[in-house]
Image (cartoon, grey):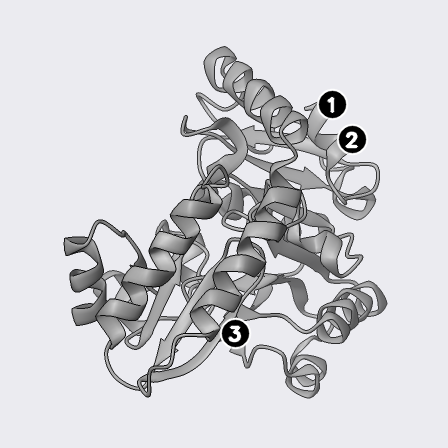
Amino acid sequence: MARLSRLSPVRGGRVFLCNSGAEAVESALKFARLATGRKKIIAAMRGFHGRTMGALSATWRREYREPFEPLVPGFEFVPYNRMDSMEREVDDETAGVILEVVQGEGGVLLGDGDYLRGVQRLCEERGALFIVDEVQTGFGRTGRMFACEHYDLSPDLLCLAKGIAGGLPMGAVVMGPRAADLPKKVHGSTFGGNPLSCAAALASIDYILTERLPQRSRTLGSRLKKGLEGIPSPVIREVRGLGLMVAVELKGPAAPNLAALADRGVLALSAGRNVMRFLPPLVITEDQVDTVIGRVAEVLA
C-alpha cells in the first residue's frame, strides 16, 4: 500500500486493496457517495468500467447493460471530451465523475489534456470527486507509469488493476485527501490485500521500474503506431494510440480482419464494430512489433 501511494499521481494517497478492476470501480463509486453525501455519478459515453452492477451502471454500451437492467440508479452519461456538456451536468447533487484517460473499449479514444484538467477543476469547484479509471492504462501501458501523468492529473480516486500483479487477481483504489477520511470498516474485501497477490504486485512493480517498461512502451508504441500509419490500405480510416495501446479504425467491420490476424498468429481485440485494438505485452521486441505491422498489412491489403 505504501509503495502504491508513493508511485501514484494521487497526492497523500490512502489505498484500498481488492481483487479486480470492476471491484476497484465499485469501491470508488461507494467512496464517492459516502464522502460527499450525494448520489449522482456522471460517466462518459463510450466508457467502460466493468461488468458488476455498479461498474456496469457506469458503462455505456447497450449490449453490456440491457440483459441486466434495471441497474443501479443515479448514473448519467455525457459525451467524452466535451467540457460544455460536463459543465451543464455536474451540480450540487453530483457525488463523482468517472472517466478513463484513454477509452479502451470505446475505441482507444484519447482524452484531451485541457478537457481532463478542466473536469478535475470542475469537480473541485462543485464538490464532486474526480474518479479516474486506470484499470487498463496503468503500470506503463501508455508510456508513463500512469496515464494521468501525461496530463498532470491528481484525481480524488484512482482505480487500478490488470498490470498491478503480473496476472494474479488484484485491484486497488488510491484515495486523495478529499476521499481519505472515510470511516473505517464501511467497505471490505475478503481476499483484498492477500499475501500472494501483494507479493506478486511488489515483484511486478519492481520489474516494471527496473526494466524501464513505461519508457519501453513509449518507444515501441511509437514504432507500432508509425508502422500501422504507413500501411497503404484504403480501408484504414485512422490510427491512434498512446504507448502500447494502439487502435486501427477501419471503414468496415473489424471482426473478419481480427480473425485473419489470429490465423497469422497475431492476437488483437475489437473496440467497437470497426476498431482493431492492439495491447501487446510491454516486453514485446522490435522484431515482434515489425512482424505485427507486416501481418496487419497483409490482412488489410
Q: Residue at x 52, y 74 (%)?
A: 76
Q: Which mark is on residue 162?
A: none
Looking at the image, can residue 33 be seen? no
Q: Are marks 1 and 2 in contact (CB under 8 Å)?
A: yes
Q: Residue at x 61, y 51 (%)?
A: 219
Residue 268: percent from the left, percent from the top? 31, 56
Asked if residue 206 is positioned above or below residue 178 in the image, the reply reads above
Q: Are marks 1 and 3 in contact (CB under 8 Å)?
A: no
What is the CA distance from the residue labelled 2 to the residue labelled 3?
33 Å
Quarter of the image for the N terminus: give it: top right
The residue that disc 3 covers is 76
Query: Front-most of 215 and 180?
Result: 215
The residue that disc 1 covers is 2
Asked if residue 258 is positioned above or below residue 154 in the image, the reply reads below
What is the CA distance from the residue labelled 1 to the residue labelled 2?
6 Å
Task: State which quadrant residue 153 falls in.
Answer: bottom right
Q: Amino acid at mark 3?
A: Glu
The secondary structure type at the circle numbered 1 is helix
Dot 3 surroundings within 10 Å: few (below 14), some, or many (20 or more)? some
